[in-house]
Each structure stands twice: as C-alpha cells, then as structure tokens.
Amino acid sequence: MKIKEMVGKKFGRLKVVELLKVGDRGAEWKCICDCGIVSAKNGYDLRSGTSRSCWCLCRELSSKREKTHGMTKTRFYKCWDGIRERCKNKNSKDYKKYGGRGIKCLWKSFEEFKKDMYHSYLIHFKKHGPKQTSLDRIDVNGHYSKENCQWATQKMQQNNTRVNHLFSFRGKTKTLTEWSRTSLAKKNKLGKELILYRINAGWPEKEILTTMVFSKRHKKL
C-alpha cells in the first residue's frame, strides 16, 4: 500500500507529527491539536475533513448549540447526545456496535433531530412516561434517520430485537428482516414474523425458508 506523506501537514486544528501504523483502513497518524491534546487519526479522515480536531472543536460547537436551544439537560437532548456518541466517538463503549458497524447518524444537527422527532416524542412521552420512551431503530442494521426511527416502549424494543436477531441458512448469516427481503422468502410468502415463529417452534433449519405458505397447509418444496 502506497502511503501519502503527511508529516508536518495541518488539517483543521490537527498537525501531523508521525506515522503510527498501517492497517486495514489505511494509515494512522499521530497528531497534536492546537489545544495540546495528542491523538491518533486515520489519514483518510484527515484528508476528507472528517477529523479536524481532537474533539475539542465538536465540544465547542456543541456548547454553542446548547446555549441557543436550552435543552441540554432534557431527556430528549441526552438521547441525541447518545446517538452521536455511539456513532462517532471511537472511545465510546458502544461504538463497536454502532459506528464500528457502519451505522451513521443522518441528522446533521440537534436542530434537525428536534424538527423530525420532538413532536412524536412529546406524544409518546405523555402516553407512556419517561421510562417507556426511548428511540428505537426499526431496522437494527439501518442508520439513525427520520425514516428508520420511532419512539418505543421497552416491550416494543425487545420485540424488534427478536425479529432482527441473526439466523444462519446455507452458510450465510442475516437478520430475520434481511432474510424476509430475499427472493426465496418472497417466493414462499414468508415475512419476518413467520420466520421467527418457525425458529421458535423448532422447525429444521433447512425447512424454515424453503416451505411455502398456503392458506390451509404448508407444502415442502
């Protein structure tokens, strides 16, 4: 792999000091921020503008936004902050499950998130209360966006997790949602709920996706 020389160059507030290592995602560089913090940054992230500071810039911008909307201490804002942590902060304990898997937050700002989700949040909050109001991704492998998010109770989230748990068939592993979208499942008229039912009922693995649904009986192909 040909590595572009970057020592001495500056990207935003970050100045590249030395090459640390070369991995699957390319080169990783030791950088020093204008604020004095030393951190490791991916070369592509630096060149593309994704990494511009040691996170001090994000904190400053966040602080400015917080002063304008006055919702910093609310549950709604903490939900937004949690999304960003899981998707963007590699030091977060949950990053591997979210950002590390390619899951992104498609809202560019808290204002966008509030515009799309605050009204439905208030309705759900009033009906179910704070402990039963949390943000749920409809497709657990999808991004955080208006189209893929809903406010849910704990029971709804648990059901969604069960429907999207992993299932292996013919050497491939997918979630039930992904299996239900395959040509085989569509041919046999199988939705994710029925696939889950067959798994819980103890059907042989080879028959779960290859048995067609009829109104009164199942016909094995």
Image (cartoon, helix red, strand yellow):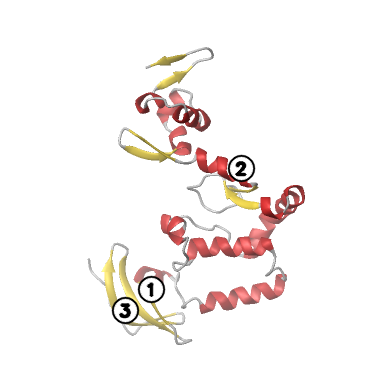
Q: Cβ–Cβ below 8 Å for labels 1 and 2? A: no
| Callout in the foreground (1, 2) | 2
Q: Amino acid at mark 3?
A: Met
Residue appearing at x 53%, y 58% in the figure:
105
Q: Residue at x 59, y 47 (%)?
A: 147
Horizontal side of 197 relative to 147 (left or right) equals left
* Outermost residue toward the top in this view: 216
Q: Earlier in the sequence, mark 2 or mark 3?
A: 3
Distance from Cα at disc 1 to Cα at disc 2 = 38 Å
Q: Which residue is mark 3?
A: 6
Front one among 131 and 57: 131
Question: Which residue is disc 2 drawn over?
Answer: 156
| Crowding at mark 2 (Cα within 10 Å: few <14, some 14-19, many 20+) | few
| Residue 220 point in image, percent of width and height | 39, 16
Frontmost of labels 3 and 1 is 1
Please determine whether, in this image, residue 92 is positioned above or below residue 10: above
Amino acid type for the residue under numbered disc 2: Met
Q: Which residue is mark 1?
A: 41
Q: Earlier in the sequence, mark 1 or mark 2?
A: 1
Amino acid under disc 1? Lys
Q: Is residue 131 left or right of residue 181?
A: right
> Where is residue 113, by image quadrant?
bottom right
Instruction: Report the front residue among 8 and 64.
Output: 64
Residue 90, x across and y down, in percent: 44, 67
Q: Residues within 10 Å of mark 3 (few under 14, many from 20)?
A: some
> Which residue is outermost to the left?
1
